[in-house]
Image (spheres, rainbow, N blue to C red):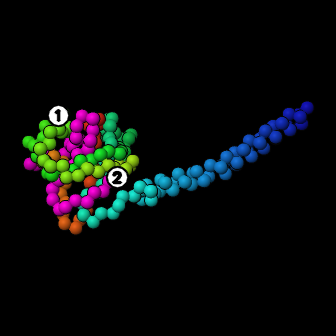
Amino acid sequence: MDKFLLLPMVLLLSFCNGSRSANQQTDHPQKMEQENKQQQSAAGGSADNQQTPIEQGIKGQVLWLAGNQMPSPDAPPSKGRGVERTLYIYELTNSSQAKTTDGVFHTNIQTNLVTQVVTDANGNFAVSLKPGKYSLFSKEEKGLFASIFDGEMNINPIEVQKGQVTNVEFLINYQASY
């Protein structure tokens, strides 16, 4: 009687092991592809969505940060995640040249719009610009967002120097708590 119970168990175990190895073989190319994508994004993006190299202007990443950002020994600080946004680049704009709501949303900007650029899905962007000083904003529901001011109350100032590319990390954090 014990032999009859043992035979179905052996068949069941051999079937389970066989199906697991078949799944591992099937999943392997997908796992390899996913790992390659992760490595490419860590190295600066995949070949499909790499930014066109620029010789002068600004490049960088737009990051979204929300929720509780209070320091904690149990959780490392969040850097944010890259998001797709439209960035608006204006001539250098002082706070007196725009209407500001909630301290970070800007409308009725009185300086000239120089250009706009849409980031990729990871928030990466690059745009060629002439040497000069600019203000950088992201398009949000409540207006154009920028939360940084310099000592002269210029809104999110960015400077481009001749023959150089200025690196920018643009943090959208109006839904974060510190």
Crowdedness near tag 2: few (<14), some (14–19) or many (≥20) residues, C-alpha within 10 Å: many
Rendered image: mark on residue 162: none
Residue 5 within the magenta-colored segment of the rendering = no
Q: What range of the chain is rendered magenta?
A: 124-152
Residue depicted at 81% across the width and 37% down the height: 9
Tell me residue 176's x, y (percent): 29, 36
Question: In this view of the protein, can residue 42 be seen by the observer?
Answer: no
Rendered image: mark on residue 101: 1
Q: Quadrant of the N terminus?
A: top right
Q: Is residue 164 above or below residue 117?
A: below
Residue depicted at 15% across the width and 49% down the height: 112
Q: Is residue 169 above or below residue 96?
A: below
Tell me residue 174's x, y (percent): 26, 37
Is 167 or 106 nearer to us in this picture? 106
Q: Number of callouts in the render?
A: 2
Element under label 2? strand
Tell me residue 47's x, y (percent): 45, 59
| Inter-mark Cα distance, 2 to 1 | 27 Å
Q: Earlier in the sequence, mark 2 or mark 1?
A: 1
Q: Quadrant of the C terminus?
A: top left
Is 111 or 29 nearer to us in this picture? 111
The residue sitting at the right extreme is: 1
Crowdedness near tag 1: few (<14), some (14–19) or many (≥20) residues, C-alpha within 10 Å: few
Q: Which residue is mark 2?
A: 124
> In the displayed structure, does residue 15 sit left or right of residue 124?
right
Residue depicted at 55% across the width and 54% down the height: 33
Element under label 1? strand
Q: Amino acid at mark 2?
A: Asn
> In the displayed structure, does residue 25 sit left or right of residue 60?
right
Tell me residue 93's x, y (percent): 13, 48
Q: Amino acid at mark 1?
A: Thr
